[in-house]
Image (cartoon, helix red, strand yellow):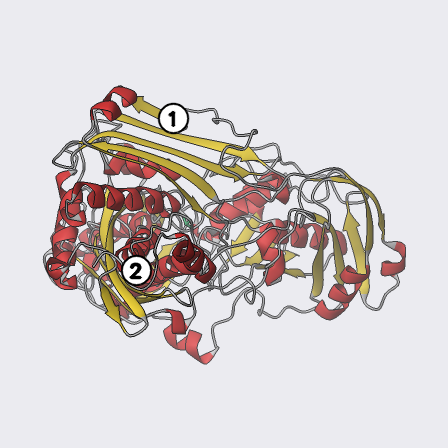
Amino acid sequence: MTTTTDSTTVQGAVGSSRTRVEGRDKVTGAARYAGEIPFAELAHGWLVLSTVARGRIRSVEDAPVRSMPGVLTVLHHGNAPRIDTDYTGMLGRPNPVVGLFQHDRVPFVGWPVALVVAETSEQAREAAEALVVRYDEEPHDVEFLAGHAGAYTPDGSDAETEKGDLEARLRAAAFVVDEEYSTPEEHHNSMEPHAATARWEGGRLDVVDSNQGTFWVSSELASLFSLDPGSVRVRSEHVGGGFGSKGLAPHQVAAVMATTLLHRPVRVVLTRRQMFSLVGYRSPTAQRITLGAGPDGRLSAFDHRALSLTSTVHEFIESSANVGRTMYDADAHHTRHQVVRLDVPTPTWMRAPGEAPGSFAVESALDELAERSGIDPVELRARNEPAAGPVSGLPFSRRNLRACLEEGARRFGWAERDPRPGLRREGRWLLGTGMAAASFPAGVGPSTAAVTAEPDGTYTVRINAADIGTGARTAMASVAADALRTDPERIRVRLGDSDLGPAWIAGGSMGTRSWAWAVRLAADELRELLALGGSVPPEGLTTRADTSDAIGAMAQKERHSYGAQFAEAAVDVTTGEVRVRRLLGIFAAGTVVNPLTARSQLVGGMTWGISMALHEEAVRDRASGGYVNADLAGYHVAAHADVPHVEADWVDDHDPEDPVGIKGIGEIGIVGVAAAIANAVWHATGVRHRRLPIRPDRVLAAEEARPGAEGASGA
Ligand code: MOS
């Protein structure tokens, strides 16, 4: 199949701003989300979660609850049907938390121990809260610490990379930075909570859900319940955010279990509080960065050691040390992941997994090197641009970081910056600016698509994409329109239904690229058929594409999106308040399909970066092992008043090997932002904050610890 890249140079639908095709439905409330779709005879399930961090369930005293109003059943490890968790799915082994009610062990606070099903959601909740569960408690450890005695290097080639003699290079270095950085536990907190309704319909299991990939969830459910994959259908039409948390989780499994037993539709919705322990989160990290550089600032030694946590039942690694494997080279280069098992829920992918916390450490350390060497932070990064993958040795497909740095510096007015810290004051505020570089892998996964020419001159695109709020429908219409040389208005897009066949998930910044590739191939073929005089029969003329072979044949290369983040911060050292005044991100992220929604995506990621720098932090109580702040009152997510004017833009870039030139923009927006802000706080105050979030009490404590600290220093 030949492909063209003319859509990147000819102004078509791709590259033009278009409002979301379902936007009107969303703002008028006509769009229905998974927890809102009505079903006749609907029953409601409510999960009961453990209150101890480690032990065994001694008893579930369900008899009194069964006679409460409306209660239909109570499921727990003593009566639940057996399911099969011994399989390997699309993204690996299932998280044991989806193996609902299969044994009496409790590995963390918030582990599902029962499901109460009732006629109404209120009755289910009332009964669930009344259910008495007794435990044999065991001592637990939930404390994440650098240097934890239980830390180990996980198996697998990804854990550690090493070249050169680190000690020798550090001894010979003109400048050395050796510091520890830490980031707290952070949660996805998608606006729409997880919700699923399951029912049996015509011999098939039909699940209406909110997820990042219906084919993914349907295949996992088929494996768990030992069903023929064709007999499971999962639909997910509108999704209010996912950020990595919306795959298979206990709510779908609970709904399927209950509907199978009760022979009526069952809905299970998670509360905000339940989401904290059931759908994953970003592990806290403790990272150590050691850099050695020559007088010109070129790195001769690079060492990144990152520790994260996982549960006792499943291993998940927050791959913070990955970022240095492709961003910065040095003669001596070492990266290592370690993990410690604690009595806590299993973390998972969360927007820019690895890169978000990893870039905080690396890009903060680079700023410290800039300070020590007297080299401008932008220039320092430009001088350290590698010619090939530092660890892989592979060529870069297209590395446009330098263009991002130059354009960002120009737009931000970086040239006028006085590098000395603590010099600028405006009333009670100390002002500073900081920057960071960013990258995120540009991946692609196999997908299938079908495009139909309808007899009325319109087209239907069938692609099992997940529109998790990103505008996937709108993007796919633009991609198909250009291939078909028509207007996006003439194209309808069907997505979010596992019956559409396999397609990549909305994850890893790979969704748009993976789906567009398949849509483009199918649409190109249809256009060629029609150009040859193919007539459109009454049922329409359909072409199909499967990108598996094309993707499998791609040459090995380093493929990434890039960015440069610039921040201005104001710090009141008498109250500890930090305000971000300006944020600018310039990205090289491939062809931008829809500038309107792409900008929203990037600004959303950058906003999350502000939140990560200053606010977000899940706190665990050592005594109980549970959360102190599992709600949006105690876990502060940046609100409107926290967010200044955020500007996101991009330089010309396209992936030469992608039919549409796409790289992916889902995650790069958050990468580097926390470091840029921390670097700006240093520039404002002269104090380094190596621990996130930069809370007022930490700013005050740092100020008090500073010798002779009063007002601006360094003048
Ligand atoms: Mo994203 S963390 O790959 O959903």
Is 415 or 230 nearer to us in this picture? Answer: 415
Task: Please name the residue shown 17% across and 41% down the image.
Answer: 373
Q: Report whether 583 appears left or right of 445.
A: left
Report the amino acid beneath label 1.
Glu
Q: How far across and how far down the image is residue 364, in percent?
A: 30, 46
**274 relative to 37, above or below:** above
**The N terminus lies in which quarter of the figure?**
top left
Where on the picture, by quarter, is residue 130? bottom right
Q: How far across and how far down the image is residue 236, in percent?
A: 49, 59
Disc 2 element: helix
Disc 1 element: strand
Asked if disc 1 is less than 8 Å from ligand 1, the answer is no
Structural crowding at the residue carrying mark 2, measured as other residues with C-alpha within 10 Å and reported as few (<14), some (14–19) or many (≥20)? many
Is 183 or 687 nearer to us in this picture? Answer: 687
Is 391 or 305 nearer to us in this picture? Answer: 305
Q: Report whether 307 appears left or right of 8.
A: right
Q: Mark 1 = which residue?
A: 160
State the mark number for residue 602.
2
Structural crowding at the residue carrying mark 1, measured as other residues with C-alpha within 10 Å and reported as few (<14), some (14–19) or many (≥20)? some
Q: Report whether 543 appears left or right of 130.
A: left
Report the amino acid beneath label 2.
Leu
Is 125 or 255 nearer to us in this picture? Answer: 125
Q: Report whether 324 appears left or right of 696.
A: left
